[in-house]
Amino acid sequence: MVGVVAFIAALIIIVPGFPIYSLTAAIPAGLTGAKKHMKGKLRNAVCDNFELLFVMEATTNLKVFSLGASTSIMIMANTMLLPVFPQMRKALGLTLQEISLMFVIVSFTAALLNPLGGILADRLGRKKIVVPSIFLYGAAGGLAGAALLILENPFRTVLFFRFLQGVGSATPMYLAVALAGDIFQSQERTRVMGFLEIANGLGKLISPIIGGIAGLLGWYAPFFVYPIISFPVAFLFWSSIKEPQQREVSLHSELGSLSRLLSLHNILALLASFAGILFLFGAMFWVGEFIGQKIPDGTVIHGLIVAIPVAAMMVTAYFTPAIATNIGPRVTLTAGLLISGVSLFLIPYIYSSKLIWPNLVLIGFSAGLLLPVLDTIGSAISSRSHRGIMTTIFGSARCLGAAAAPYIIATLLDINIHATFLPIAGLAVILAFVIFFFTDEEKMLPPELKEKR
C-alpha cells in the first residue's frame, strides 16, 4: 500500500499543475467570456495568468513541472509526518518538545546550509547542487524509517538521518526559485513564482494526506515514502532543466553581493519570510496536536484537517501575482500580515467552536498573499550571477521560521493557549505596520516589473 500511495504522490508531484493544465483546451473560449465580465487591470492580470498557463502547456510545461516537483517534495520533509506525530510520540515515549526536534533539526539544518548551497550553486551550477541534494533527502528519509523498524531505541539515530534530510532539503526548493529567475523574465517571472508557490502549497496539501494514508500501515510508514518520490523527481530534474550558461563567480564577489541585503526593505522582507512560515507551520503543528488529542487514531482525518490552511494558501497564491501587480507588494504584504495577526489572535477564543474551520482558511489565505510576493522580491535583489545565494538566504529565513514554529508552539502550550498565540499575533500586526510605513515599494520590485506597473 505504501508503494501505491507513493506512486500516486509521485504522479501528483511530478505534474503539479495537472488539474489546471487538463482544462487548457477550454481556455481560449473561456478567456473571451471572462474578459467580457471582468473590468480593469485585475481582469487583464487574471486572464494573463491563464494565458500564461496555456502557453506553458505547449512550450515549457515540463521545465516548470520539474521546478515545481523539486519544490513540492522538499516541503514534505515535515508536513508528511504531522498526521502521525501523535502516534509517533506515544510509541517512542517522547514529550511534545522532544518530538518537535524531529521537525526542528531538518529546518534548522537547512537554514544554516542554504547560503552555502547558494554560493556553490552560483559557482558550480544549480543542477549540480539540486540533484544530489534530492537523492540525499530521499535516502535519508528511508534510512530513518529503517532505524525505527530495526533499533530498540531509535530516537537519536532517527535524529541523525533527519539531520541528513535537512542537508538534502537545504537548497533545491530555493534554487528552483533562482532557476525560475534565470529562465523567465518580466511579468512571466512573477507568474511562474506564483506557480512555484502553488507547487509548494500542493506539496503541503497532499503530504499530510499521503502521510495519513501511509500511516494506516503504521506511524513509521511515511518515512519510506520519501525515497520513492524523491528519486524519480531527481531524474526528471536532471533531464528536463537546461540551465542557462553563467560566468564563474568569485567568492569575494558572492560575499560582496550580500551588502544588497542591508537595505531596510530587504531586511523586512527577510523578517516577513521568517514570520510567514512561522505562522503557517505553527498553526499546522498545533492543529496536528489538537486533532491528535481529539481523534487519537484517525491519521487520514488528521491529514485532511492539517491540509485545510494549505489548500487556502495554494488557491490564494495563484491569484496573488495579479493582486500584487495592481496594489503593489507593500500593500499585499501588509494585508497578508494583518490577516495572519487577526486569525492567530482568534484561535484561543474559538478553537473549541466551529469557527475554527474558517479561521484555518484565513491563516492559509494570509500565507498565500505573503509568500509569492516574497519569492519575487528575493529573486529580484541581484543579477543572475548572484541569484543563487540571494534566494537561498531568503530560504534560510523560511527554514528558520519552520524550525522555530514547532518548538515555540510546544513550549508555549505548556503555559496555555493564550500565551501561545497572542504574542505571535502581536508580532504579525507589528511587522505589518512597520512594512507599510517604512518600506520603499519601488525598491522592492525589479526594474522590468516597475515598467509594467
Image (cartoon, helix red, strand yellow):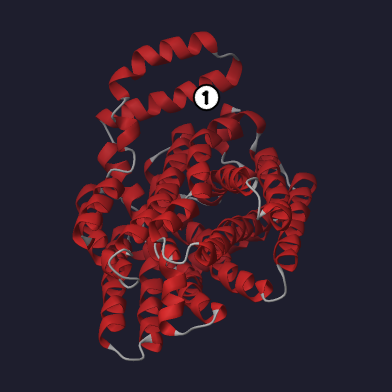
Residue, far top: 36
Q: Quadrant of residue 129?
A: bottom left
The answer to whether 236 appears left or right of 402 in the picture is left
Q: Is residue 108 visible?
A: yes
The answer to whether 109 appears left or right of 365 in the picture is left
Query: As rendered, which of 84 and 106 lies closer to the eye?
Result: 84
Q: Is residue 116 visible?
A: no
Where the N terminus falls, by quadrant? bottom left
Q: Residue at x 42, y 59 (%)?
A: 75
Q: Residue at x 59, y 13 (%)?
A: 39
**Label 1 element class:** helix
Q: Where in the figure is residue 69, as x and y percent of width and height?
A: 32, 51
Query: As rendered, which of 301 and 133 lies closer to the eye?
Result: 301
Compared with residue 253, is residue 62 higher up or lower down, i.e. above or below? above
Q: Quadrant of residue 219?
A: bottom left
Q: Where in the figure is residue 68, as x and y percent of width and height?
A: 35, 48
Query: As rendered, which of 9 and 346 lies closer to the eye?
Result: 346
Q: Callout 1: few (<14), some (14-19), or many (20+) C-alpha neighbours within 10 Å?
A: many
Q: Residue at x 47, y 75 (%)?
A: 109
Question: Which residue position is annotated with label 1?
Answer: 45
Q: Where in the figure is residue 79, as x and y percent of width and height?
A: 44, 61
- Callout 1 amino acid: Ala
Q: Where in the figure is residue 191, as x and y percent of width and height?
A: 46, 36
